[in-house]
Image: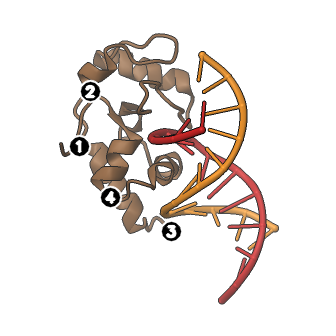
Chain colours: A brown, B red, C orange
Amino acid sequence: MNELTEFEKQVLVMVRKIPSGRVSTYAEIAKAISRPGAVRAVGNALNKNPDAPIVPCHRVVKSNGEIGGYARGIEKKIKLLNKEGVAINNNQVIDFSDIIFKFKR
DNA sequence: AGTAAGGCGGGCA
DNA sequence: GTGCCCGCCTTAC
C-alpha cells in the first residue's frame, strides 16, 4: 500500500536533492522529471506523500516566490525554512531568486 | 471497470 | 495585482 508511482518517486527523489537553506519550485521539479506540464501533479505528489523525514517538501515553493501551501500547515513550513536560514515575509520568500535551487540549468 | 472531481501551481489576459 | 483557464496525476464513487 506504500507503492509509489514512478511519477511520485521521481518527484520525491528530486525534492530530496534540495540542500538545506535553499528552496526549489514545483515548476523546476516538474521540468526536472520531464513533465513541465505536470507542475500541479508534483504538488499533488508531495501533498499525499510521506513528506516526513524522507522528503523536505517545505523547501519547495511556488515559482513566483510564494511559499505555496503545506498539508501540515503553512506556518510550519515557514518555521522550518526560517530555521534553515530562509527568511520569509508575508508568505513570500525573501531573496527568493538568490536561494532558489535548480536541478538542471 | 469507467467516470468524475480534486489539488501545495503556472501562465496568460 | 487580480482573475481565468489549462494540463497533469491521484483518489473516490
**Whole-percent x, y for residue A67 in the image:** 46, 26
Look at the image and tell me in which quarter the C terminus of chain A lies: top left
What percent of the width, then of the height, locates residue A6? 37, 67
Q: Which mark is residue A22?
A: 2
Badge 4 crowding class, 10 Å Cα cut-off, few under 14, some 14 to 19, many 20 or more, is some
Q: Position of residue A3 (x, y in %)?
A: 44, 68
Q: Circle 3: is it few (<14), some (14-19), or many (20+) Cα within 10 Å? A: few
Of residues A104 and A69, the one nearer the viewer is A104
Q: Amino acid at mark 3?
A: Met
Q: Which residue is mark 3?
A: A1
Mark 1 belongs to chain: A
Q: Are marks 3 and 1 on the same chain?
A: yes
Q: Is there CB contact under 8 Å for labels 1 and 4?
A: no
**Which amino acid is tagged 4?**
Gln
* Discs 1 and 4 lie in a common subunit: yes
Q: Residues within 10 Å of mark 2 (few under 14, many from 20)?
A: some
Sequence order check, earlier mark of 3 and 1: 3
Q: CA distance from mark 1 to mark 4?
A: 11 Å
The picture quadrant where one finds residue A100 is top left
Kindly identify the amino acid type of the residue bearing the numbered disc 2: Arg
Residue A54 visible somewhere in the drawing: no
Query: Of the residues under marks 2 and 3, which one precedes in the sequence?
Result: 3
User: As displayed, is residue C12 above or below residue A82?
Assistant: below
- Label 1 sits on what residue type? Lys
